[in-house]
Amino acid sequence: MSKINPPVDNTLSNRETLARSKSRYFLTWRWHFYAGLFVIPFMLMLSLTGLVMLFDDEIEFSRYQSALEVTPEKDIVATSQQMASVIAAYPNAMVTQFIPAKSSDLANRFSIMLESGQTLFVTVNPYNGEVLGTIDRSDSWYELANDIHGTLLLGNWGDYLIEIAASLGVILLVTGVYLWLPRDKASKAGFLKIRMASGPRILMRDLHANIGGLLSFILLFFFVSGLAWASIWGGKFVQAWSSFPAEKWDNVPLSTQNHASMNHGSEEEIPWNLEQTLMPESHDHAAMLAAGSGAMHHDTKMDHDTNMHSEAKLGVDQILAQAKTLGFTLFKLNLPRSETGVYTLAANTMSGDITDPRLDRTTHIDQYSGRVLADVTWNEYNIMGKFMAAGIALHKGDVSVVNKIVNVFFCLAFIFIAISGVVMWWIRRPVGKKVLGAPPRFEHEGVWKVGLITIVVLSFMLPMAGGTIAFVLFVDWLVFSRMNKLNLALN
């Protein structure tokens, strides 16, 4: 005897599916709303400071044209003679870096550190060795914009706030794309369309959703590459595990200082995956002293009384000749800052020396023997190191003029996305009521599990975002939900 199965109630099943979908949609919208509350001010700040940093060269040249511009001549004087002019002008300073001009009509730069700790660029005419002027490295518009961009001028606390914003920005993008993609007739109506005649709210929604959706992967790239510089996700997780292992260098003594010690202020001049790597040391000094070697500074005319790093046997002219032999063209030369310090030739996209990341190269040279202690190139970078080397040039608009123009467009688009989000909230906010105007709740059994799992996953992937969302949801449950219930009871 066959058993007759009861008929399936398709109407009930459809209602269940619709209720679950609706609940998931409003849950996603609430997360998007709360993430936007925190992210929007930071998105505006990052975009505006990014615009300033994009035009750093133009701004600097307009401010210091007399100290940077030279008339090209046939012959140039030795770099050691140019350095001697710098030391004569600033006898108590330490010369830390030499940056050759990128074109024949620009001055060379020598970075010096004064006894007060202040760092200056001293510009020198390469054709006659004359000191033209100085540029305070901490007084540049780029330095100020970069400090705001990275720390809000608040140190570590500012860094943490920006990391939270960037982490929540990833959540904002994911939830925004989910809300943007078509699911039903209502969402399909505005997908990749701008409805001009449907009122300001619909118009602003279409502009916000479509521009944000189309640029979501671009904005994600900016967030992720920026997060790699952050203290927690970048410094403690990604960068720490992606750093170049100094142990790969063969029989090279290591310093207690890392590569980041060569940075000047907040300027990131060293490749990202080398910042936490320990520096090599020059180690022929003791042997030279035992052999009674002298005349250690013949071509720089520096002694211990006039330049604190002047124990080097090899002068700057010899190192520059070696750089040419090694194939360096555009680069920075960092000078030894102690008896065990090294000369470092650096050509990388991180500091804008070059635009092709495949040509990245950092070479350390023993200041006494001239032996190459370490030579790190693109081929030695791991996957994340290569992503950062290639990505940072795009992030900063250094690849080409087109890259800079496109980045300007992106910054303006991100500013519009942020402002349009505020305008949308302002249009739909409850008028005359003291409520935040968050999207309504649509509770459904099982959806809370999705939220819980998402928070757990986020806590592992982006700990600052996971912790912040957990805190906001607690406040939402403790305060806002009760305020809404109270308002409903009073009304």
Image (tube, helix red, strand yellow):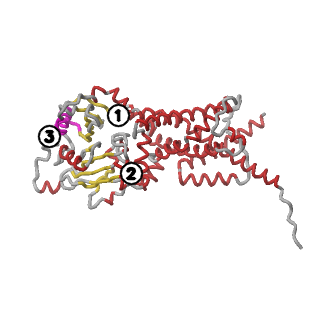
> Which part of the image, by quadrant, shows the C terminus?
top right
Nearest to viewer (mark 1 / mark 2): 2
Real-space CA distance between mark 1 and mark 2, rounded to the nearest whole angstrom: 25 Å
Name the side, left or right, on which 333 lies relative to 433. left
Q: Are marks 3 and 2 in contact (CB under 8 Å)?
A: no
Number of the label disc, if any, that sits on residue 301? 3
How many residues crowd around disc 1 within 10 Å: few (fewer than 14), some, or many (20 or more)?
some
The amino acid sitting under disc 3 is Lys
The residue that disc 2 covers is 273
Label 1 SS: helix
> Which part of the image, by quadrant, shows the N terminus?
bottom right
Residue 111 in the image: state x and y as whole percent. Answer: 27, 37
The amino acid sitting under disc 2 is Asn
Real-space CA distance between mark 3 and mark 2, rounded to the nearest whole angstrom: 36 Å
Which is more N-terminal, label 2 or label 1?
1
Residue 255 visible in the displayed image: no
Residue 107 lies within the magenta run: no
The residue that disc 1 covers is 138
Name the side, left or right, on which 423 lies relative to 431. left
Residue 420 visible in the displayed image: yes
Q: Is 165 or 389 nearer to us in this picture?
A: 389
Label 2 SS: helix
Residue 169 in the image: state x and y as whole percent. Answer: 55, 43
Residue 382 in the image: state x and y as whole percent. Answer: 40, 55
How many residues crowd around disc 2 within 10 Å: few (fewer than 14), some, or many (20 or more)?
many
Q: Quadrant of residue 74?
A: top left
The amino acid sitting under disc 1 is Ser
Q: Are marks 1 and 3 in contact (CB under 8 Å)?
A: no
Number of the label disc, if any, that sits on residue 199? none
Real-space CA distance between mark 1 and mark 3, rounded to the nearest whole angstrom: 29 Å
Q: Which residues are magenta?
A: 76-93
